[in-house]
Image (spheres, rainbow, N blue to C red):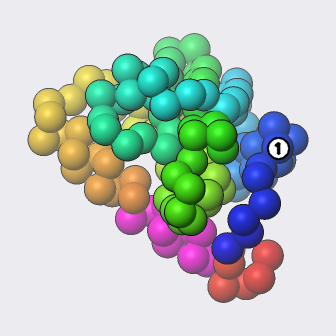
Amino acid sequence: MATAVPSQRKLDDLRREWQKRLKLRDWTISVKFADLKFLRDLTDIENPVGACEHFAETKQARIWVLQPSEWDAEPNERQQDVEDTIVHELLHCHFAAFGDRSDVGRLYVEQTIETLTAALIGLKRQKGG
Ligand SMILES: [Zn+2]
């Protein structure tokens, strides 16, 4: 796992690569770093590493990744693997069209996205590419 601190350019490159792969090219999507408080307010979870504000009607989304200055002192793969975070948040765009959900529905969506993200990233890294 790369331990280098990712740049904004890295986020843009990953967003471009996966937006294309996930067939989200008709969406307008930005990816930027955000601080922990902002992410907590947005996601309502204790230790978020990312968040996605999506607008299915206009096909726009803003993805936020926890800024490296707030990563744990100990190596934390969840925080360091910004590619995983970006793929996860991009997948939310596909699910956005399903509309608002109950808490249980949201949980299923999160679990499904986790599974798909792991599978997709696994495929890419297996091929070494
Ligand atoms: Zn999610």
Residue 110 in magenta stretch? no
Q: Is residue 100 left or right of 57 when viewed as pictured? A: left
Q: Residue at x 56, y 56 (%)?
A: 73
Q: Position of residue 13 (x, y in %)?
A: 83, 47
Is 122 in the magenta? Answer: yes
- Given residues 23 and 7, the one toward you in this image is 7
Counting other residues with Cα less than 10 Å from the Cα at mark 1, is it few (<14), some (14-19), or many (20 or more)? few
The residue tagged 1 is 7
Q: In which quadrant of the rendered view does residue 37 lie?
A: top left
In the displayed structure image, the side of residue 121 where residue 2 appears, left or right:
right
- Which quadrant would residue 84 be assigned to in this image? bottom right
92 sits left or right of 41 in the view: right
Report the residue at 26% width, 24% height from top. 100
Q: Residue at x 39, y 65 (%)?
A: 115
Provide the major secondary structure of the magenta segment.
Answer: helix
Q: Position of residue 101 (x, y in %)?
A: 21, 29
Q: Is residue 24 above or below residue 54?
A: below
Measuring from the top left, give residue 123's x and y in whole percent: 61, 77
Outermost residue, right side: 9
Instruction: Examine the rendering and report whether any part of residue 18 can be seen.
Output: yes
Q: Magenta residues? A: 115-124
At label 1, the amino acid type is: Ser
Is 75 placed above or below 79 here?
Answer: below
Horizontal arrangement in the rendering, residue 45 relative to residue 34 (left or right): left
State the image coordinates of residue 24 (x, y, percent, origin top left): 65, 40
User: Can you say which quadrant of the picture contains the C terminus?
Assistant: bottom right
